[in-house]
Amino acid sequence: MYATDSYSALLVPPRPAGLSDPRALLRDLFDTAVAAASAGHCLPPRLPAPPRGRTVVIGAGKAAAAMAQAVELHWQGELSGLVVTRYGHGAPCRKIEVVEAAHPVPDEAGQQAARRMVELVGGLTADDLVLCLVSGGGSALLAAPAPGITLADKQAVNRALLKSGADIGEMNCVRKHLSALKGGRLALHCAPARVETLLISDIPGDDPALIASGPTLPDATTCADALAVLARYGIAVPAHVRAHLESGAGETPKPGDARFAGHRSITLATAQQALEAAAARARELGIEAHVLSDSVEGEAREVALVHAAIARQVAQHGQPFRKPCVLLSGGETTVTVRGRGRGGRNAEFLLALAAALDGQPGVHAIACDTDGIDGSEDNAGALLSPDTLARAGARGLSALARLADNDGYGFFDGLGDLIVTGPTRTNVNDFRAILIV
């Protein structure tokens, strides 16, 4: 016969040590996910063998400098090259030049880097290797407008796409057909050298041709597809830009094109790998983890409603999972900007999640961009607790009012709940974790 206390202990599992500080636990899971997607971790084992001739390294993206650094540290033989990354995302390299440029709207620095990249791969031979390092953000950073299109044209279209609510595939479809290098065209400049592309994926579904608009990979989309995206979101473009698309002048090389024979692409890191690493870390701490999806898309505030409904079901009914547990998801949501506030898609997600949960006891959450920059702000994301709305009310902050103004940054900044990491130099998109205790 057991005493009452002992019998209760048999029915109720011991509380995992990690649950004593939910916020620290959630930050730990995010840091684990980022580390799993870092270039230093995932790139060295996938390097190709050196060629008989020269090795030239080129690349673009938020992780490009860290990838270049990893290549330098582990490459056997001579190499040279140039990569372009976002301002503040550089890394020290000795043989590969690192240029910093603007993101998400391209600038002259990115355009100049693209021109120099083309010059570097000119005159190569079949004995040479071009190692192309590609990660999310490369679409804006590798700024090479097609003939007849100006940098100002591309900047205006980029701004409109970013505000429209278009998903990343739709945005990159338009970008490819207004570019001189995206959609496989950069690889054509490398001929007859062999091209090996190493990628860190920020694309739901991890289609290599979509990452940074696929500068070295053939493109299955068309100018007609790009025009359809512009029409779908009501994006007006100058007459000469429309004529460029309607005439077919912006068409990209397609799958099956013999000019890509012998080339290879390898995806090094994905959202799924980052989520699996975070799940393994949670289980190490004694907390069951469930990956809902690595490729969630849609409006951030609508995605939040679905996550809130699942979290409430777990918290109130123990379905479909028993608590304590953590729910993990990745992908890339969108925000249709209607207000004048500050905040990226992760802050928007958390703000909508807070409103939907309405103080549900025992539910904590984190949402961050794995590149360390939520949209164009200086934070990676933010944290949410059961008392978020109560603390906000005490400070005169309305979640619904801030959501209507797209001001997730201002809301969480007012609570001291922003997460600021600085650039992580990788990018596998959104990371969300909801802890239910």
Image: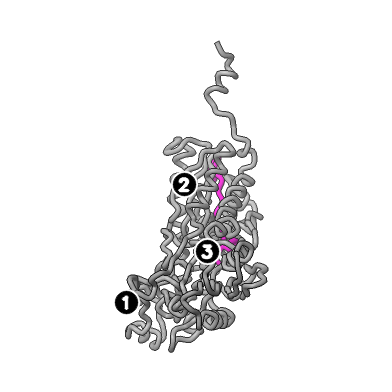
Callout 3 amino acid: Ala
Q: Residue at x 36, y 73 (%)?
A: 229
- Comparing 193 with 432, the one in front is 193
CA gap between label 1 and label 2 equals 37 Å
User: Residue 201, image x and y in percent?
Assistant: 48, 61
For the residues carrying marks 3 and 2, which lies nearer the camera in this image? 3
Which residue corresponds to mark 1?
A: 224
Q: Which residues make up the magenta segment?
A: 359-375
For the residues carrying marks 3 and 1, which lies nearer the camera in this image? 3
Which residue corresponds to mark 2?
A: 291
Circles 1 and 2, Cβ within 8 Å, touching? The answer is no
Above-or-below relation of 316 to 26: above
Which tag, 3 or 2, sits closer to the chain's start? 3
Callout 2 amino acid: Val
Q: For mark 2, give the secondary structure.
A: strand
User: Residue 184, image x and y in percent?
Assistant: 42, 74
User: Residue 81, image x and y in percent?
Assistant: 58, 75
Which residue corresponds to mark 3?
A: 49
Circles 3 and 1, Cβ within 8 Å, touching? The answer is no
Which tag, 3 or 1, sits closer to the chain's start? 3
Q: For mark 3, give the secondary structure.
A: loop
Callout 1 amino acid: Ala
Q: Quadrant of the N terminus?
A: top right
Q: Quick one: label 3, few (<14), some, or many (20+) residues within 10 Å?
A: few
